[in-house]
Image (spheres, grey):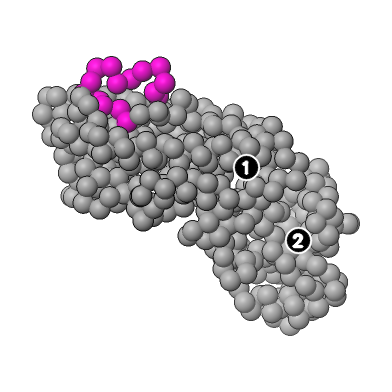
């Protein structure tokens, strides 16, 4: 079978931590379910690099040994499992094994989100919920368990992220210098060509799962603009230049940054005004985070930080042009499973718990003119927020001015 080489495993200390978290939340267990990769959270928690081709259920109880319900064809991945493995072949056997595993009246955490408010958490199909409820248990959302055990960074991942962040910042600086040289020499360097050079540099530095957005002029007003070899435009003088780039070291968590330049000697007043608004929104988000440093109850939510940032943009008169959330979770997925800094696209009311990482990236996009985004990354520890992006940008870089790179820049 295709999946016999992988083995599900939870470190005993990690299992004890999960069980303690369950008891703290008055939960009787965490039921992890997957079928063909519909719930990657389950596979991450269980250490399964590839999804199964048949349904499985893994119950991590608040007390005692974990239990798995697995298909007869897919027993090898559970050969190192630390508890009972209940094997089924027919659908009747599946339902019977699940009923045997679940205790009627128990409160069980599952990957679900009421009204689909948090889509990346809403992984359990309606029919599976019905199956669980038929066993007599009470399913409830697993959001904080996901934050703690599928999205929080280890110490090693934090160090890896810092290294990746330094690489991104250095590559971004080099890209602005290349763009400036190309404009001066009238080389007609296109967005696509500069992107290719950025990707080459990231790859040479050892990062994987890399990508970049290079957008000039009106293209920078498209929040999800993707240059192509066919449609990319040349980078010319007197244009806003946006560079977004991301990647990670193998097996670790991502770093993700956006930097802004202007291909002239002096940034125009309107562009500078928009930048000051975006930078202020970025700062407001950080101040909101810092104000709750040391809060043992961790009451700050992703939607609260989004509101703090968004208020600055709205008060400046650009609210209708801030067309995305303030930030997204970051872990071993670029857009991770933890809390997003979002109260608009979704209402992310999840608490911001120590150990997680996320972006702060307010933006203002003026259709047909230009867009401005400033993206930094933050790791949240019990001591407070750490901005992991080296020397966050204070001003848009006027890249044809030889003095644009100053000590407060990249």
Q: Is residue 157 above or below residue 131?
A: above
The residue positioned farthest toward the left in the image shown? 186
Residue 332 located within the stretch drawn in magenta: no
Seen in the image, is 168 located left or right of residue 49?
left
Q: Main secondary structure of the magenta part?
A: loop
Residue 404 located within the stretch drawn in magenta: yes
Q: Of residues 45 and 158, which is closer to you in this image?
A: 158
Occupied quadrant, residue 28: bottom right
Which residue in the structure is indicated by mark 2? 30
What label sits on residue 356 in the rendered view? 1
Question: Which residue is drawn at the image coordinates 42% and 21% (left, top)?
Answer: 408
Seen in the image, is 113 located left or right of residue 232?
right
Seen in the image, is 341 located left or right of residue 383?
left
* Residue 14 placement (x, y as % from top left): 77, 45
Q: Classify mark 2: residues with Cα within 10 Å, few (<14), some (14-19) or many (20+).
A: many
Q: Classify mark 1: residues with Cα within 10 Å, few (<14), some (14-19) or many (20+).
A: many
Q: Start and end of the magenta stretch? A: 396-410
Which quarter shows the C terminus? top left
Question: Which residue is drawn at the image coordinates 56% and 68% (left, top)?
Answer: 116
Q: Circle 2 sits in a helix, a strand or a loop, which is it?
A: strand
* Residue 6 placement (x, y as % from top left): 64, 52
C-alpha distance separating marks 2 and 1: 20 Å
Q: In this view, does 336 lie above or below 248?
A: below
Q: Of residues 88 and 132, which is closer to you in this image?
A: 132
Of callouts 2 and 1, the N-terminal one:
2
Q: Is residue 194 above or below residue 131?
A: above
Which quarter shows the N terminus? bottom right
């Amino acid at each position: 079978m295709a999946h016999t080489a992988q083995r599900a495993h939870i470190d005993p200390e990690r299992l004890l931590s999960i069980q303690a978290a369950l008891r703290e939340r008055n939960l009787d267990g965490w039921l992890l379910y997957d079928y063909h990769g519909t719930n990657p959270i389950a596979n991450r928690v269980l250490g399964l690099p590839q999804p199964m081709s048949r349904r499985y259920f893994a119950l991590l109880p608040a007390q005692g040994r974990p239990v798995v319900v697995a298909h007869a064809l897919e027993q090898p991945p559970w050969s190192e499992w630390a508890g009972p493995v209940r094997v089924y072949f027919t659908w009747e056997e599946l339902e019977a094994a699940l009923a045997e595993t679940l205790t009627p009246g128990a409160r069980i955490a599952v990957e679900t989100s009421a009204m689909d408010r948090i889509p990346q958490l809403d992984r359990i199909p309606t029919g599976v919920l019905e199956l669980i409820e038929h066993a007599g248990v009470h399913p409830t959302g697993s959001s904080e368990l996901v934050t703690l055990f599928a999205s929080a960074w280890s110490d090693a991942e934090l160090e890896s992220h810092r290294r990746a962040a330094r690489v991104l910042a250095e590559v971004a600086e080099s890209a602005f210098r290349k763009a400036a040289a190309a404009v001066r020499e009238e080389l007609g360097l296109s967005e696509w060509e500069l992107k290719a050079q950025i990707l080459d540099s990231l790859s040479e530095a050892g990062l994987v799962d890399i990508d970049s957005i290079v957008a000039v002029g009106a293209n920078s007003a498209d929040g999800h603009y993707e240059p192509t070899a066919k449609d990319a435009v040349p980078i010319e003088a007197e244009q806003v230049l946006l560079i977004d780039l991301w990647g990670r070291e193998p097996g670790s968590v991502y770093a993700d940054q956006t930097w802004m330049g202007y291909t002239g000697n002096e940034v125009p007043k309107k562009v500078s005004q928009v930048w000051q608004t975006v930078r202020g929104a970025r700062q407001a988000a950080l101040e909101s985070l810092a104000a709750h440093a040391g809060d043992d109850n961790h009451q700050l939510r992703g939607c609260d930080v989004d509101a703090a940032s968004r208020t600055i943009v709205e008060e400046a008169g650009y609210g209708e042009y801030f067309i995305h959330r303030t930030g997204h979770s970051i872990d071993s997925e670029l857009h991770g499973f933890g809390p997003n800094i979002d109260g608009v696209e979704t209402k992310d009311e999840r608490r911001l718990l120590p150990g997680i990482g996320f972006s702060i990236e307010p933006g203002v996009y003026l259709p047909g003119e230009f867009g401005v985004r400033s993206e930094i990354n933050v790791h949240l520890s019990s001591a407070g927020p750490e901005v992991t992006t080296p020397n966050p940008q204070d001003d848009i870089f006027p890249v044809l001015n030889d003095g644009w790179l100053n000590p407060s820049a990249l």
